[in-house]
Amino acid sequence: MPDTEALPYPHEIWREICAQHGNRSDALIEILHAVQAECGYLSDDALKGVAHAVNISRAEIYGVVTFYHDFRREPVSEHCIKLCRAEACQAVGSEELAQHAEARLYGHTSIRLEAVYCLGNCALGPAALVDGELKARLTPAAFDAAVNALEAKA
């Protein structure tokens, strides 16, 4: 097992998480999910620490993190809107809604807009998850109302 005691990383929750998984490289994805769940994102220091702890190269870790879109490399915004861009939602106006959403949130730092490709609510499109809550049959006005509600929480 690698000596992780000598590494000077400021956020070392990865050390405990790796140990819980036996510092096994075959548990890399579970480890990365756990670190992200604990910290909100995967910092360079955490990735270096995990690579050292499970004895794999940083290149391998970065390959995994960049391949899977659920991994975040930067701190997340306070709020998240996941807008469906799949074919069923496109057929009922999600492309126009996406253009409106991008313009509405341009420069916004507390609300992150993410494209997703199917929320499993195809009959309710255009659809989005606003901080995990499903919003169906969204119009630009309904989108703006959802954004205003998020802004009011701040």
Image: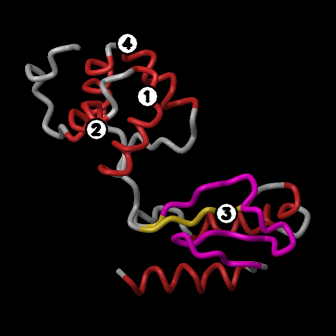
Residue shown at the point (44%, 37%) measured from the top left: 30
Q: CA distance from mark 2 to mark 4?
A: 18 Å
Q: What residue would you read off at disc 3?
A: 83
| Left or right of 146 on screen, residue 92 | right
Instruction: Check if mark 3's residue and mark 1's residue have beta carbons within 8 Å.
Output: no
Q: Earlier in the sequence, mark 4 or mark 1?
A: 1
Which is more N-terminal, label 1 or label 3? 1
> Does the magenta portion include 34?
no
Mark 4 or mark 3, which has the lower sequence index? 4
Question: What amino acid is at disc 2?
Answer: Ile
Direction from residue 128 to residue 124 in the image, left or right? right
**13 is higher (above) or lower (below) than 112:** above
The x and y percentages for residue 28 are 43, 28
The quarter of the picture where residue 8 lies is top left
Task: Please tell me the numbered disc located at residue 27.
Answer: 1
Pointer 4 residue: 57
Residue 66: % across, % down = 52, 30
Confirm or deny contact between disc 2 and disc 1 (CB under 8 A): no
At 39% from the left and 84% from the top, the residue drawn is 153
Please tell me how crowded label 1 is: few (under 14), some (14-19), or many (20+) other residues with Cα within 10 Å.
few
Ranked by sequence position, the earlier of labels 2 and 4 is 2
Disc 2 and disc 4 in contact, CB within 8 angstroms: no
Dividing the image into 4 quarters, which one contains the N terminus? top left
Q: Residues within 10 Å of mark 4 (few under 14, many from 20)?
A: some
Q: For numbered disc 2, what is the local secondary structure? A: helix
What segment is highlighted magenta in the picture? 112-136
Q: Nearer the viewer, mark 3 or mark 2?
A: 2
Q: Vertical placement of 96 versus 9: above or below?
A: below
